[in-house]
Image (spheres, grey):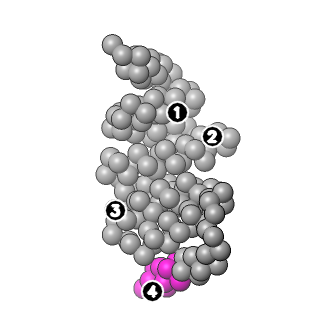
Amino acid sequence: MSDRVAEVKEKMLSADAQPADVGAQIAAAYACDRYGTETDAIRYYDAAWALGVPDDQRRRFMVGYGSTLRNVGRVTGAVDVLRQSITESPEYAPHHAFLALALHDLGEHDAALGSALTALLEAGAVSLDGYDRALSYYRDVLTSAIRRDHSEP
């Protein structure tokens, strides 16, 4: 058995033995994700979410959870988690990037592109060579069109 498989099994057994331990649930979710078994990971993500993820782990957790929800076909749930994460930490670029992927899967292409542009603009370390203002404008146009579309009855 490879070291990676052993690690995943160990984390899963630990989480199963400690269903009320949010840390064990998160560790198992991450191990399953790293190994590529999202269907296993999702039950640990769901359990951790229900238990309440500690604030100091929440941003990274929500990216992983949202991404995994998307990967197992629960795209609407992914959008909900990622939108909530953006409300909590709007400056965290990974939330916007993974939301863009989920919105694209739902066919909401303008919203996806707006979210992707937000991720790019929030990344900060990336040089946009003076195009920040133009990209911000296009993002705002895309996201304001989305708000108009969703506000109509």
C-alpha span from label 2 to label 1:
9 Å
Mark 1 is surrounded, within 10 Å at the Cα level, by few (under 14), some (14 to 19) or many (20 or more) other residues, namely: many
Does the magenta stretch mainly form a helix, a strand or a loop? helix
Left or right for 146, reference 22: left
The answer to whether residue 128 of the structure is visible from this angle is yes
Q: Give the x, y percent position of residue 35.
A: 38, 31
Circle nearer the N terminus (4, 1): 1
Quadrant that contains the N terminus: top left
Residue shown at 40%/39% (left/top)?
42
Total numbered labels placed on residues in the image: 4
Which residue corresponds to mark 1? 26
The answer to whether residue 144 of the structure is visible from this angle is no
Q: Quadrant of residue 133?
A: bottom right
**Does the residue at mark 2 contact the one at mark 1 (Cβ under 8 Å)?**
yes
Circle nearer the N terminus (2, 1): 1
C-alpha span from label 3 to label 4:
23 Å
C-alpha span from label 2 to label 4:
37 Å
- The amino acid marked with disc number 2 is Gln
C-alpha span from label 4 to label 1:
39 Å
Residue 105 is tagged as 3
Residue 152 is tagged as 4
Question: In the image, which is nearer the foreground, mark 2 or mark 3?
Answer: 3
SS for dot 2: helix
- Pick whichever, 68 or 133, lies toward us: 133
- The amino acid marked with disc number 1 is Ile
Circle nearer the N terminus (2, 4): 2
Q: Where does the magenta region start and end?
A: 140-153
- The amino acid marked with disc number 3 is Asp
Residue shown at 66%/60% (left/top)?
124
